Amino acid sequence: MSRQTPQPATNKRTGPQAGLLTSLGQNHARAFFFSAGKLTRHPLSSLLTALVIGITLALPAALHLLVQNMDALSFSWERTVQASVFLSDDLSEEQGRQMATRIAEHPEVEETEYISREKALAEFRELSGFGAALDLLEENPLPAVIAVQPVATASALQIEDLLKELSLTKGVDSARIDQSWLERLNGILIIVQHIVQALALLLALAVIVTVGNTIRLDIQNRKAEIEVMKLLGATNAFVRRPFLYTGVWYGLCGGIVAWLLLQIVLGVLSGPVRHLAGLYQSDFSLSGLNFEATVLLFLAGIALGWTGSWWTVTRHLQAIEPK
């Protein structure tokens, strides 16, 4: 009796599953490129829709860039803020310079500069324009000052402790630093951030409505075609798929338009901003969207386009049935 060679075991579901995945992938690819081709057949209306979506997406993105650049500017200002240590009049210039040297050795201090009473008066005379009035004074009313530059890594609490320590130093009348305007600026930036978030939500709804209205018109124009497809056995998911990809294309094109608009605005403003910063001896320049923010902008457009399309198709597709 001949002996049969055992055959290796096979998974019967491997073939059907692979075929199902292949068919599903082909259907999605077909719908993806079909929806793209459909947009190119109506370039003007597609461009106008993408432009509306792009402007809507560009507004919160531009405000985000404004807050981002103002935050970077305020941070650079914080690093240039100096503390002023006012010395007693009975302290000699030599003692004042020695104190400036000791303060410079503090771990929270980057550098110091001693400004004598004569130099302070000369600077005040030059900057204030009250030279004639100062000549009427019998003696110099200005005290000697030590300009203290804190280290860049010093926190607000550390700077406050430093000022308290310097105020208690013998020979020091007072020590102060004017950061109240920076605190007010930071408070305004926090409010603007909340406004940007609220505006982004409202404009996101506007994008969804814009895409939804465009898809609704498309559904109405293809109502007879959809009825025939359902009569031939097409499911709602099959009919819905091209419309969803159309929303994705609208959102992606809108994101690209928003990015281009932001680049144009940054290009127009970068020159004047650099010129203004140069007048204040600053190298500040506008920064645009980085790679992560750009990808997020495109993904936001795609997500909103898909959401608007899905919302509209789901509402209207159920009402279309073959008669």
Image (tube, helix red, strand yellow):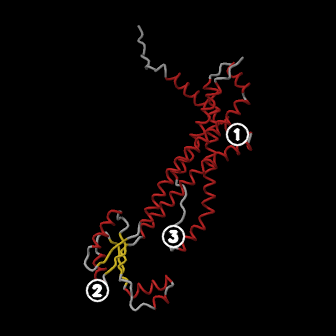
| Residue 189 in the image, given as x and y percentages of width and height | 48, 57
Q: From the image, which quarter does the C terminus lie in?
A: top right
Nearer to me, 127 or 314: 127
Query: Mark 1 or 3, which is nearer the eye?
Result: 3
**Separation (CA) of disc 1 from disc 3:** 45 Å
Question: Within 10 Å of the Cα at label 2, are there few (<14), some (14-19), or many (20+) other Cα atoms?
Answer: few
Q: On screen, 13 above or below 101?
A: above
**Vertical order, 320 against 100 (above or below):** above
**Which amino acid does the dot numbered 3 rest on?**
Asp
Residue located beneath label 2 in the image: 90
Of residues 41 and 113, which is closer to you in this image? 113
Q: Secondary structure at mark 1?
A: helix
Residue 257 % position (x, y): 64, 49
Q: Is residue 50 above or below residue 144?
A: above
Q: Position of residue 176 (x, y in %)?
A: 36, 72
1 or 2: mark nearer the eye: 2
Whether residue 270 is situated above or below residue 230 in the rendered picture: below
Query: What secondary structure is marked by label 2?
Result: loop
For the residues bearing labels 1 and 3, Cβ distance under 8 angstroms: no
**Which residue shows up at 64% across the image and 41% down it?**
250
Across and down, in percent, residue 18 comes to 53, 26
Please give the residue where the numbered disc 3 appears in the rendered image.
Answer: 283
The residue where tag 1 is placed is 39
Q: Is residue 119 left or right of residue 55?
A: left
Q: Amino acid at mark 2?
A: Asp
Image-based side of 211 in relation to 1, left or right: right
